[in-house]
Amino acid sequence: MKFDEEKIIHPLNGFVGLFINILVMLFSIAVFVIDAVLFECLLIGGALFAILLVLSILLFVATCICFGGLRVINPNEALVLSLFGKYYGTIYDSGFYFVNPFATAIYPKNVEEEGKKENLQLSSKSSQSLKITPRKISTKIQTFANGNQKVNDSLGNPIEVSAIIVWKVVNATRAVINIDDYKAYLSNQTDSTIRNIARLYPYDIIDDDDDNEEKTLRGSASTIASEMKDELSARVENAGIEIIDVRLNQIAYAPEIAAAMLQRQQAVAVIAARQKIVEGAVSMVEMALERLKEDDVVNLDEERKAQMVSNLLVVLCGNKEASPIVNAGSIY
C-alpha cells in the first residue's frame, strides 16, 4: 500500500509537556510519602493505604514513560511516527515537542542498520545497554553525483556519461514508508534515466552540416539534462523526492574508441577547412580574371588562362608559402 496522503501533526510544546510531567511526578511522590506517614500514624486503614500506594506508583511509572515522548526536531528535518504499527503522523516544524510516548520513529533501512551497528559497538565498549536515538529524515537540499555510466549513443558508439543531481525530500512519509532506502532508490533511478536518455542522441554530429539541427549529447547538454530531470522527477515522485536540477558532469567517448573518434573528427575538420579554402581560392581566381578582362590589362587565350588559374590555385591552396618566379620576357 502506498501512502500518498501525508498527515502533518502539530504536537504539544515540549516545555509544557515537561512541566506537566514533572508536576505529576512530584505529585505521585508526595502521595506516596503522605500515604506512608498517614499509615504509620494509623490515620488511614490498610485498604486505603494500598489504593493510594498503587495509584502513586502508577502515576510515577506513567510519568517516567511520558518522558520518552519528548522529541527535538532540528531545522530542515522531519520525523515520521507510527503508533502500534500504524502511521501516526509527520512533524516538519523545528522545535521541542511532546508526542505520544508510544509513537516510534520510522526511518530508512540503511539508517536502522547503522544504528544497530553503533549499538553493537557501544555495547562492546560498555557494560551498560546504550540506545541510539532514532534519526530524522533530512529535508535539506542535497547533491548526488553518480559514477560514470558506459552507454551506447544513438549511433552505437560507447560513451561515458555522468550527472550531478540536486534534490531534496519534500514528503518524508513517502520516503520512509513507500521506499526501503530512498537514497539507494534515487541512485538506481538516476543510472537508469541516464542510460535511457543518452541512448536516444548521438554524442556529436560527425558530418559538417550547418543546417543540421539534430540534438547531440555534447552540443545540447542543457536540453538533454532538462529531459533527464523531467523523467527522473516522475520516477522518484513516489519516494517523496523533488529533483531541483540535473547537470551533465562528464560526456566523453569510451577509452577504447576515443583515439579513433579523435582521428575521425580531425579528418572531418581538415576536409571542411580544405573545402573553405578551395571555395575562397576559386572565387579569387574568378575575380582576378574578370578584373583583368574589364580593365583590359592583358588579353589571355584559353591556354594562358588555364595556366594562370593553375598557378593561382597552387599558391592559394598550398600548405606552404609559394616562391614566385618573375618572368621578365614575353609570356608568349
Image (spheres, grey):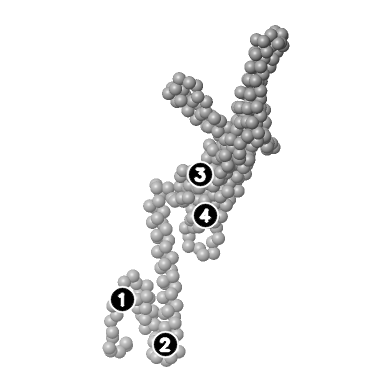
The mark nearer the N terminus, 4 or 1, is 4
Indicate which disc residue 64 carries: none
The mark nearer the N terminus, 2 or 3, is 3
Q: Is residue 163 left or right of residue 300?
A: right
Nearer to me, 36 or 225: 36
Count neighbours of disc 3 (C-alpha within 10 A) and say few if under 14, some if 14 to 19, many if 20 or more.
some
Residue wearing tag 1: 322
Count neighbours of disc 1 (C-alpha within 10 A) and say few if under 14, some if 14 to 19, many if 20 or more.
few
Nearer to me, 285 or 167: 167
- Disc 3 marks which amino acid? Phe
Question: Is residue 50 in sight in this rendering?
Answer: no
Q: CA distance from mark 4 to mark 1?
A: 44 Å
Nearer to me, 158 or 13: 13
Residue wearing tag 4: 221
Q: For residue 62, which quarter of the picture?
A: top right
Residue 302 at x, y percent in the picture: 40, 83
Q: CA distance from mark 3 to mark 4?
A: 18 Å
Residue wearing tag 3: 144
- Residue found at x 66% / y 29%: 20
